[in-house]
Amino acid sequence: MLSDQELLRYSRQILLAQVDIDGQLKLKGSRALIVGLGGLGSPVALYLAAAGVGELHLADFDTVDLTNLQRQVMHDTPSIGMTKVDSARARLQAINPEIALVAHRTALDEDSLAEAVRAVDLVLDCSDNFGTREAVNRACVAAGKPLVSGAAIRLEGQLSVFDPRQPHSPCYHCLYGHGSEAELTCSEAGVIGPLVGLVGSLQALEALKVLAGFGEPLIGRLLLIDALGSRFRELRVKRDPGCAVCGDRHG
């Protein structure tokens, strides 16, 4: 059940017919893994904590650096030198002491990543490199867990939801294959701060929709964001039957 404090804390979203008490209870009983606590992971973690997702698993092996603060809004100047996980824990506990936080402070290898994915209901990929995104995708496909994937670089962003529980849903590998220009990082190519905030906020929204069971998540659709021209474009993405990760010949 929801306590009186929880009913008051979440009252504005409980008022939504699409959420209501049942949806809030689903969020309270949900567990989400956030891979990466930087530019994308900051708004993701802040909004999921504020919305009352009951258990957030935080994965990042990096520490807070001065160059992060232009866009990684969960961290602040006193956080410089701290692990991003510990900086995030302090901020999220202050925002919502009702939720549980699970820390992963070291890099996740294949086995530990698979275990971390199995322990949750949904994964949010907020990493900044293709290798991690591919590894997270493989673990989600293997465990049958939905994946909310976002990316932002320069003045362009992308967002999609991959759900192996849905027979027609593609996976990340169906879309990107063996890599692309996404290999570049923000430290190499640059990025504007509000763009990662926008993409991360949309990732949080998609996660809430999947966990609470409302709306139409971006499954089978890729949202492209052109920040320079303030334009949004949507592409349909089909599952590849021959995909090396989720294709028919692999299961």
Image (tube, rainbow, N blue to C red):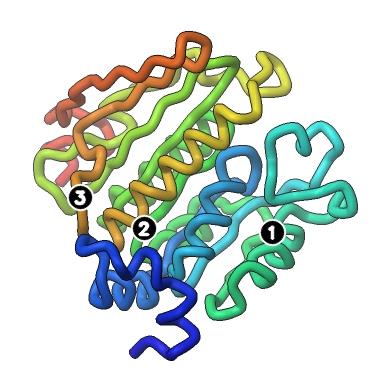
Q: Which mark is residue 190?
A: none
Classify 241 as above or below 34.
above
Q: Residue 171 or 78: which is nearer the viewer?
A: 78
Quadrant that contains the N terminus: bottom left
Q: Position of residue 108 (x, y in %)?
A: 58, 53
Tell me the kind of residue under disc 2. Leu
Residue 175 in the figure: left or right of residue 128: left
- Residue topped by disc 2: 122
Q: Residue 155 or 84: which is nearer the viewer?
A: 155
Q: Residue at x 33, y 35 (%)?
A: 160
Label 2 and label 3: CA atoms lie apart by 16 Å
Tell me the kind of residue under disc 1. Ala
Residue 79 in the figure: left or right of residue 150: right
N-term-proximal mark, 2 vs 1: 1
Q: Position of residue 97 (x, y in %)?
A: 61, 78
Looking at the rendering, which quadrant does residue 167 occupy?
A: top left
Q: Residue 35 or 17: which is nearer the viewer?
A: 17
Q: Residue at x 23, y 20 (%)?
A: 235
N-term-proximal mark, 3 vs 1: 1
Q: Which mark is residue 215?
A: 3
Q: Position of residue 155 (x, y in %)?
A: 55, 15
- Residue topped by disc 1: 88
Q: Given this view, does label 2 or label 3 mark the residue nearer the observer? A: 3
Q: Secondary structure at mark 1?
A: helix
Label 3 and label 1: CA atoms lie apart by 29 Å
Tell me the kind of residue under disc 3. Gly
Q: Position of residue 5 (x, y in %)?
A: 49, 85
* Crowd class of label 3 (few under 14; some 14 to 19; many from 20; radius 10 Å): few
Q: Given this view, does label 2 or label 1 mark the residue nearer the observer? A: 1
Residue 54 in the figure: left or right of residue 166: right
